Image (cartoon, rainbow, N blue to C red):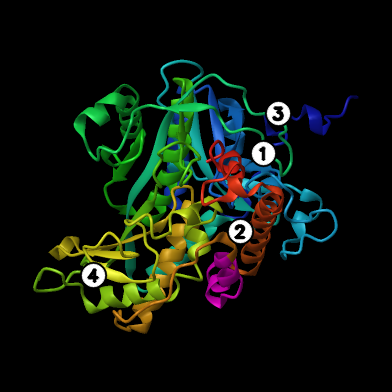
Amino acid sequence: MVSRSWATLGEDSGVGRPCFIAEFGLWDERQIAAAEQVELQLEEVDLVRVVFCDPHGLARSKTVPAGVFRSVLRNGMDFSAGPFLFDTGHAVAVDFLADAGVGVGELLGAGDFVLVPDPRTFQVLPRANGARTAWVLGDEYLRDGTPHPLSSRGVLRRVLAEYALHDLSPVIGLEVEWYLTRLTGGPVGNEGNGFGVQGPAPEVVAVDPGYQFNLDSAYDCVADIADPLAAMLMRLGLPLRSFEHESGPGQLETTFNPMRAADAADAMLLLRTQLKQECRRVGHHASFMTLPRLESFDASGWHLHQSVSSTKTQRNLFAEGDGLQDAVSPEGQAYIEGLLTRAREFCLLSVPTVNGYRRLAPEFTLAPTTVDWQFENRSAMVRVLSGGSATHVENRIGEPCANPYLLIASQLHAGLEGLLAGLPAALAPRPLLPRSLREALDAFRASESAERLLGAPLKACLTRLKECEADRFDAWSATAPPEALAGVVTEWEHREYFGAF
């Protein structure tokens, strides 16, 4: 008699744990209903990319045949802990062999966790050629069925649960700038590459001269690439509002209509991933790096629009009753005060890279340098747009490559603290924003509010990841010639961020 070994168990092998989702009750009724619809859609799909968002805001995935994904819908999917251990340059920042040091025992030995797909995020990717491929986001769980403490999507889910307890629902609008460049066919960048040492960035050229803001002919220069990208985003069901040509050469801004906060974070991850992939397929490169090391390029930002509605009355809490110009309600002012109070502590979650702090400087007049707020002023950190029921705030601090779940969660957490405290937003002088990753890291490390938001394990993990990144930059800077550091974007930054982000 031949026994059935683990290797001969067919489609259930290596894709999570038998009946993991049902055993621990990990889906709500909406997800159960969505999974039934996904089962039907799988007849029209060849492959499925099972995705989660790592601490840096990058999508990590495994691609499985549609038949195997049927098992993933019952069992979840095993994933390595590696993405929780590496910094932006894939240096090992968390010691998983001796002492993980972040309070998550399963990191020792880099053991697997289980990713549970969220069937509500299942999308068939609109590709003209190749295998019919779908994409689905998942939530991270430990092997005992408890939520993974290092899950950034889980952080946002917890914050939204707090809003629900107060009968509140946040509304988020995305406005993100990024660069479209043309690949020149240079080396792939493997030379000198390794763990913690990034090889050369992609070789590119600009697609237009730039510095003609919103000029129609400037957009027309990139329309052959940008228009199909816009159509792709709409086919993905994203509420696209506009594609615009910004200041820099090939710098584009993509904006979306207001969404629920969880949907906005999912949309940002999908947007960045699909834009980069589709651009590469047509010989171009999309980068969400704040300021690439390229001639005449301008800094890019991510402006996060926010308001809060009552789930009982559907009223926008920020709207002033009489509809006056330059007016925001007391609740709106309290929310703003929360954003201002936590701005320095949470800056690391909005601007998580060495390169991002180049934008928070006086030479970039439309980027904030001070913790402040004003009506209709794009140089302020928090710009208030008043317009009756459409009144909302725009926080202009973020960089386009930030982790969308952590950036949005940190904003909503700070805003809710302000709402519950009920203090008005003062116009008194405020401190400066951090000017470097190291300064932001110091403020983050000392923050008790950051620990309440993230939990001790994720705060410790992010601290180690960012310390490693900052240490590697400092080590490179210590041996670089003075001219390589003279107020310009360094080669280290360009290698580190331009390709990955």
Element marked by disc 1? loop
Q: Give the CA distance from mark 4 to mark 2.
A: 33 Å
Q: Give the CA distance from mark 3 to mark 1.
A: 9 Å
First to last magenta residue range: 439-454
Residue 147: numbered disc: 2
Measured as percent of width and height from the top left, residue 242 is found at 25, 40
Element marked by disc 4? loop
Q: Residue at x 23, y 70 (%)?
A: 318
Earlier-in-chain disc, 2 versus 1: 2
Q: Residue at x 62, y 47 (%)?
A: 88
Residue marked by disc 4: 318
Measured as percent of width and height from the top left, residue 141 is found at 63, 53
Q: Is residue 180 above or below residue 82?
A: above
Residue 191: numbered disc: 3
Q: Residue at x 80, y 29 (%)?
A: 7
Earlier-in-chain disc, 4 versus 2: 2
Residue marked by disc 1: 198
Q: For this view, does 137 lie left or right of residue 335? A: right
Q: Is residue 201 above or below residue 382?
A: above
Q: Give the CA distance from mark 2 to mark 1.
A: 33 Å
Element marked by disc 3? loop
